[in-house]
Amino acid sequence: MVSLGNGDTLPPAELVTTELITPGLKQNGGIAFSEQGDLFLANFQKEGQIGKYSAGPNTKPEVFIDLEEWISPVGDLTPRAEGIRVDKENRVLVTDAGTGKLLRISPSAHKLEVLADSYDGYRFGTVKDLAIAPNGDLFVSSPHSGTIYRIRPDIGYVGILNDDLVRVEGLAMSPNGKQLVAAEPDASRVVVYDIPEDLILVDSWTLVDFSPSGVEPKGVAFDEKGRLFLALGNLNEVRVFDLELGLELARYDVGGEAENISYWSGSLYIGGGNQMRRLRLRD
């Protein structure tokens, strides 16, 4: 058996193979794991539907919830799930890009809450991705408005994080909750926000600038060691960075589009088009 790596080391690219795990799905949205290892997929079989893979052998994907049964259209706009995360209480949080809402769904899918749908009296435009901080703060990207919203549900606070204009799609929070990483494909760059405890505006700093090459970073994710994984769209590649040092650590071929990314238990899960692939980084 060839050893891949342990929790501290990344395997070389030639030892990492791509495994197709969900062929033929009509899935093109975010992916997220619960702490128990259940995998949730946005736009599972159709737009607005959330799918679920339960942890365990010989399981099959199932419908977790259909947002069209809960969310009314806004004009000709219907629910379309994009970003998805699972919080510590196993509630599923979803950015509904179709009608511009941040949703929270109970573990049983019997309760759905709209946590936010407007700021300063104006309805959200398209909301793309979200991230959860350890203190429960939520961050939601709205690329068309150039905004990252900061939401504190327990006090009903909805504000803006960024003092600069960013058209962000993918978001990821560092494990220590001190930094929010944002992928901005239109500008071919990845930026970082140092998160203050106070609810104030902050500027970003650039971690990676792909603009000379035109590479469009899409999805972002961290592992438990704080290493940052970037899904690079139609480059069909994932790159790994040390956020603290700003150094590139590794590159992995995905074998297909790399739009959405999630890390779980030593493996990367990458969604793109109607397929999902797994890259196992640890034995």
Image (tube, grey):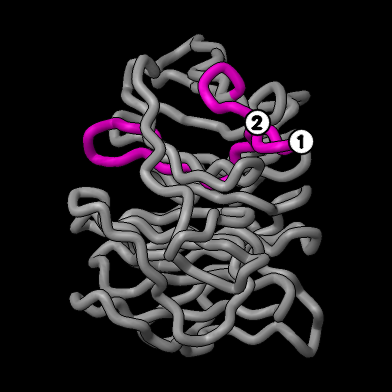
Quadrant in which residue 203 is drawn? bottom left
- Is 79 covered by the magenta stretch? yes
Q: Quadrant of residue 89 in the image?
A: top left
Q: Nearer the viewer, residue 25 or 185?
A: 185
In the displayed structure, does residue 261 sit left or right of residue 25? left
Viewer can see residue 7: no
What residue is rendered at 19% in x and 49% in y? 154
Q: Is residue 118 above or below residue 277?
A: below
Secondary structure beneath dot 2 equals loop
Give the residue displayed 77% in from the left and 41% down from the top: 273
Residue 76 image label: 1
- Horizontal and vertical percent for residue 161? 39, 74
- In the rendered image, the vertical position of residue 81 relative to residue 129, given as above or below: above
What kind of secondary structure does the magenta stretch mostly adopt?
loop
Residue at (35% x, 21% y) in the render: 111
Residue 4: percent from left, percent from top: 47, 51
Magenta residues (range):
68-92
**130 in magenta:** no
The answer to the question of whether label 2 and label 1 lie on touching residues, with beta carbons closer than 8 A, is yes
How far across and how far down the image is residue 219, in percent?
Answer: 59, 58
Residue 151: which quarter of the image?
bottom left
Could you say which is closer to the camera, residue 154 or residue 39? 154
Q: How many marks?
A: 2
User: Label 2 sits on what residue type?
Assistant: Pro
Q: Work out whether 18 lies above or below 46.
A: below
Question: Is 117 placed above or below 107 here?
Answer: below
Q: Position of residue 24 (x, y in %)?
A: 77, 24
- Towards the viewer: 161 or 272: 161
Q: Dot 2: within a 10 Å radius of its alpha carbon, few (fewer than 14), some, or many (20 or more) residues? A: few
Type of amino acid under label 1: Asp
Numbered circle sitting on residue 73: 2
